[in-house]
Image (spheres, helix red, strand yellow):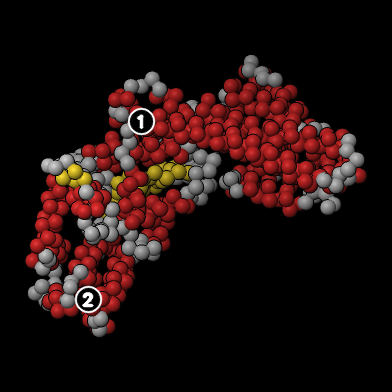
Amino acid sequence: MSGPDPDRFQRALDRFRANLSPSMINEFSNCTLRDVRDFCDNIQRTQGREGKLRYMGRLKAFIEAMEEFGKVIEVYLNATTILCFVWGPMKFLLGIAKTYVDSFDKLLDVYAEVGRAIPGFLHYQAAFEKHPPLATVLEDYYSDILAFHQAALSVFKRSAWKHIFHSTWKTFNTKFGPILHSLSKRRELLESEKSSAALLGIERLRQDFSDACKKHARQIAQVADERHRQRVSHICERLMPPNYQIDQEMSTEDRQGQNSGMWIFQDPSFRAWFSNDNDIVRHGVLYVNGIPGAGKTTLMSAVVARLLDCVRPKENASVVAYFYFKQKQPDKESHNGLLRAILAQLIDRDPTIADHLNEKTSSIEGTNLRATGTLEKLVKTALENFQITYIVLDGLDECAPNEAEKSVRWFLSLINGGLQETGVALRVLFCGQRDGTLDTLLADQPSISLEKSGHVKDILQYCRDFCRKIREKFDISLEMENDIIQRVTNEAQGMFLYARVVLENLLNQTQLYRLRQEMEPGTFPQGIDKAYERVAVRIFQQSSEAEQEDAKRMLGWITCARRLLRWREIQSLFCIDPVEGVVDYEGRRLRVTMTRGYA
């Protein structure tokens, strides 16, 4: 081992740069110690004229320590390219924090703490030269300084940082504590090894110190995470958001194959809406529309899944939220229900927002907290703290009267100047039937019509995949299989639901003879109503008496229910005898299943 490894410095720097925008990387790349000194002098002159002088001598220990660090490491690598990402963030942070006295003082204090934790490196230069393995500790110091700046940047890069500074600084302290602990431990290592005659175990000692610091950081993070979970739970108890996760889960289960819906991610309109270039912060709207039964909800589940995979919340840069409107479900057919679900997701994604809104709403009574006006203000506050927010709204045609218009108009008002903070972008994807209202409100916005897109190819592929099951069951010819595919695809006219109902009915026939009958010109269904009619014929004319009786009971429950029923709920209704007051799961449950969780 011959001393510090330049590759390790570079890997640490690469991790730091990964959280920066291209413009910030460019800005930091050209910064020097002279730039920082000149900038500090300008701040003091300005504060002096305004009578707001702060003691900037608190920066001295940090600046001197990093200046000595540069002189020591230049023996091993190009110090300029390494230190510019120390001086650049420092200048940026001071420039932002100077506008707010409380934040400026707190920033100066933490620089003073870091400076006190770092030793004078020139004091150890002779030891580094005599014992090169000892110099590897410099790699650890550099990583810690970058981690410190990354934590500080997460506070001051927020567009609305002044409004929630108290909460953001609490989050920063959670990260800063372990970093300061790590710096102190590294100083202990350096001082103990300088006086030690045996340096052969330096790598093991570094690893032990590193492991101990990581363990300490994990413990702090676990405590913070538990505190966040409790805070979110407390807010949601009062907020009472509708269960938005279950709709995503069930819609995902309904997707026809892993590749279903993938075409939308190549659509130019979607790509323009999704573009997440950190240097191009702009709002965006996309209107996805289609006929009833086209499979819009299933397609949106694919979009939500992709966004959740691609948009990882880091340093409050971006976040994803979604909502599925559901007809005749009180919590899921109103603008108010939407706001509660979106707010719940935003506070869950960001501990700082959760802390800020928890303090802000602690004195608001639950009913008032759930008032639409209050919710709109809270959601707006949360949105102003993310650089890019992606929101997917499905089923707007299923809203109660006038509720869809409320939601669309409110989001458009935010996009058209309602968000006060600059540097934030709101991207909203509206999805629903063309019902006249949405078409009028979103007439000037980019749109994707499912009937004129790759959606039709999805239906064709679904028919091909499904018809393989029919061929295997009935041993039909390739010609008959192709005939089924062609007729179902043509008749579907962009309606996924039609293809599914018809093909499942064909597969559930009990004889090849009956399958052929279903394909006869006078019998083969034209339109979704006729498709359901053929299913009813199979159930009520071709099934056993017991199957018909069970089907009638199920249809009665489904028809009278105020919301969609889960399959397990239907099973429980069969198992419970309210007259006798008994439950017999094994004896009464249906010995059939369903492909979906809802009926």
- Where does residue 176 sit, x and y in percent of width and height? 63, 32
Q: Label 2 sits on what residue type?
A: Ile
Identify the residue shown where x is 72% and y is 24%. 58
Quadrant of the rendered structure where residue 458 is?
bottom left
Q: Is residue 295 visible?
A: no
Secondary-structure class at tag 1:
helix
Q: Residues within 10 Å of mark 1 (few under 14, many from 20)?
A: few
The label on residue 237 is: 1
Q: Is residue 553 left or right of residue 164?
A: left
252 relative to 114, above or below: below
Q: Label 1 sits on what residue type?
A: Glu
Identify the residue shown where x is 32% and y is 25%. 366
Secondary-structure class at tag 2:
helix
The label on residue 484 is: 2
Q: Is residue 358 left or right of residue 581?
A: right
- Where does residue 401 sit, x and y in percent of width and height? 18, 40
475 relative to 166, above or below: below
Q: Is residue 169 left or right of residue 437?
A: right
Q: Is residue 190 left or right of residue 129?
A: left
Q: Nearer the viewer, mark 1 or mark 2?
A: 1
- Where does residue 213 sit, x and y in percent of width and height? 68, 38
